Amino acid sequence: MAKTFLHGGSAVERILLADDDTGLCELLTEFLEAEGFKVESIHDGRKVASRVLAERFSLVILDVMLPGLSGMEVLKEIRRQSVVPVLMLTARGDDVDRINRIDLTTVEFDLLETLAHSAGTAMSREVLVRSVLKRSFSPFDRSLDVHISNLRRKIGTYSDGSDRIKTVRGLGYILALPTEMSGQ
């Protein structure tokens, strides 16, 4: 944790709050500062990543719907160079729109992102190895399967118990759409 400000002789945790709702920022800042945190607010997505990378923060609270750059785009930029904890905020309530606080490795994140771009469509092991692991495909290399297994464990199943990532025998993997979205 980044402790950089001294307040009354003790270190104060720094939080970056990125949300375009200034009223919400003021409310959260008041609450967090009353709990002893030092809070800095930014209201434009284009400024967040550079600020996070220029300073040390204990936590980033990031709105999904930022102007300039979306919260997801900002998170991707941050993750290229930092492991600072990020809490995603969203006003959306649907299960599909919810963001889960999940600790993924870079490979797992890239794998999930690649599968998500083609959600509902099977992707071959060869394509996944080349695009995510950035190496030549070997049918005897099981490292992709290990990453898939770890990712499945971390993201869990849909509320109906069905797998989010399914194996397509003889081909590869698919990020399955929830039953209500796929029309099943």
Image (cartoon, grey):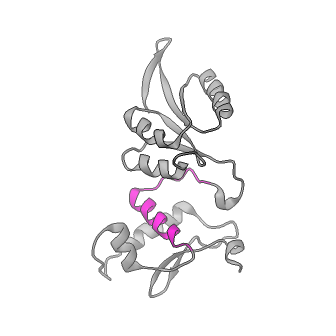
Q: In this view, does 69 lie to the left or right of 77?
A: right
Can you name the residue that lies furthest to the top here? 8
- Viewer-proximal residue, 146 or 46? 46
Q: Can residue 136 be seen in this view?
A: yes
Q: Which quadrant of the figure contains the N terminus?
A: top left
Q: Is residue 171 above or below residue 128?
A: below
Question: Which residue is drawn at the image coordinates 67% and 34% (left, top)?
Answer: 24
The image shows residue 31 at horizontal and vertical percentages of 65, 26
Question: Which residue is drawn at the image coordinates 51% and 48% (left, top)?
Answer: 69
Q: Can residue 143 be seen in this view?
A: no
Q: Which quadrant of the figure contains the C terminus?
A: bottom right
Q: In this view, does 178 lie to the left or right of 1?
A: right
The image shows residue 106 at horizontal and vertical percentages of 40, 57
The reply to whether the magenta stretch includes residue 177 is no
Can you name the residue that lies furthest to the front here? 68
Q: Which region is colored magenta?
A: 99-119
Question: Which residue is drawn at the image coordinates 42% and 49% (left, top)?
Answer: 77
The reply to whether the magenta stretch includes residue 114 is yes
| Tally of numbered tags | 0
Can you name the residue that lies furthest to the bottom here? 170
The image shows residue 89 at horizontal and vertical percentages of 62, 45
Q: Quadrant of residue 23?
A: top right
Q: Is residue 148 left or right of residue 175?
A: left
- Viewer-proximal residue, 46 or 138? 46
- Viewer-proximal residue, 41 or 84? 41
Q: Quadrant of residue 162?
A: bottom right
